[in-house]
Image (tube, grey):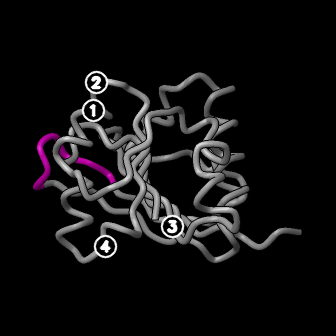
């Protein structure tokens, strides 16, 4: 499992609390400061400082056959379209058909289908108890062809 945009580690902690073994989780964080923070907070995890638009290269050494699932807090709607397309391409490359991509966002409108053309939305819900409220969407990688 890969987490994109580990930030301060709130989602990372929740993933671990809900039973994801530390050796199965790789956290990707673009900010050097936040990557350092995550390494200090979660010394048992592999934290990679880098850009999700180059995810395949960042994971090449450990994940040559793809990943089982990806959890993301990246602000896909507000990123430059070129960056969003590059990230979507990385997701398509790394996730096998039927694998899951979970996106959570504070933009309650959710992810427009055009941003992830090779994924099918399986579920979406707003978590009103989160401050601020967040939308959690689960996408499934569609079969090629």
Give whichever of discs 3 and 2 has the lower sequence position: 2
Residue 101 is marked as none
Q: Mostly what secondary structure, the magenta segment?
A: loop
What is the residue that sits farthest to the right in this orientation?
145
Magenta part of the chain: 129-135
Callout 2 touching callout 1 (CB < 8 Å): yes
Dot 3: what SS? strand
How far, Cα to Cα, is label 1 from label 3?
24 Å
In the rendering, at what x and y percent does residue 47 appear?
Answer: 37, 46
| Mark 1 or 3: the one toward you | 1
Secondary structure of the residue carrying tag 2 is helix
Q: Residue at x 19, y 41 (%)?
A: 40
Residue positioned 46% across, 57% down in the render: 2
Disc ID at residue 36? 1
Above or below — where is 42 with respect to 6?
below
Residue highlighted by disc 2: 33
Residue 69: assigned label = 3
Task: Report, in whole angstroms, how far the alpha carbon at label 4 lies from the one at label 2.
Answer: 25 Å
Q: Nearer the viewer, mark 1 or mark 4?
A: 1
- The earlier-in-sequence mark between 1 and 4 is 4
Q: Nearer the viewer, mark 3 or mark 4?
A: 4
Q: Where, by quadrant of the figure, is residue 115 drawn?
A: top right
Examine the structure image and report whether residue 141 is included in the region drawn in magenta: no
Q: Residue at x 31, y 56 (%)?
A: 45
Mark in the foreground, 3 or 2: 2
**Residue picked out by circle 4:** 20
Mark 3–mark 2 Cα distance, whole angstroms, equals 25 Å
Quadrant where the image shows the C terminus: bottom right
As helix, strand or loop, the secondary structure at mark 1 comes to helix
| Crowding at mark 4 (Cα within 10 Å: few <14, some 14-19, many 20+) | some
């Amino acid at each position: 499992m890969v987490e994109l945009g580990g930030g301060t580690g709130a989602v990372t902690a929740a993933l671990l609390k809900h039973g994801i073994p530390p050796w199965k989780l790789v956290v990707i964080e673009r900010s050097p400061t936040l990557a350092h923070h995550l390494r200090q907070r979660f010394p048992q995890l592999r934290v990679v400082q880098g850009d999700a638009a180059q995810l395949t290269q960042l994971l090449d050494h450990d994940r040559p056959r793809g990943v089982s699932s990806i959890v993301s807090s990246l602000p896909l709607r507000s990123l430059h379209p070129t960056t969003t397309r590059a990230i979507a391409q990385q997701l398509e490359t790394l996730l096998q058909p039927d694998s899951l991509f979970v996106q959570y966002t504070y933009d309650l409108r959710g992810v427009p289908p055009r941003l992830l053309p090779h994924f099918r939305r399986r579920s979406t819900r707003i978590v009103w108890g989160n401050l601020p409220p967040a939308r959690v969407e689960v996408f499934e990688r569609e079969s090629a062809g």
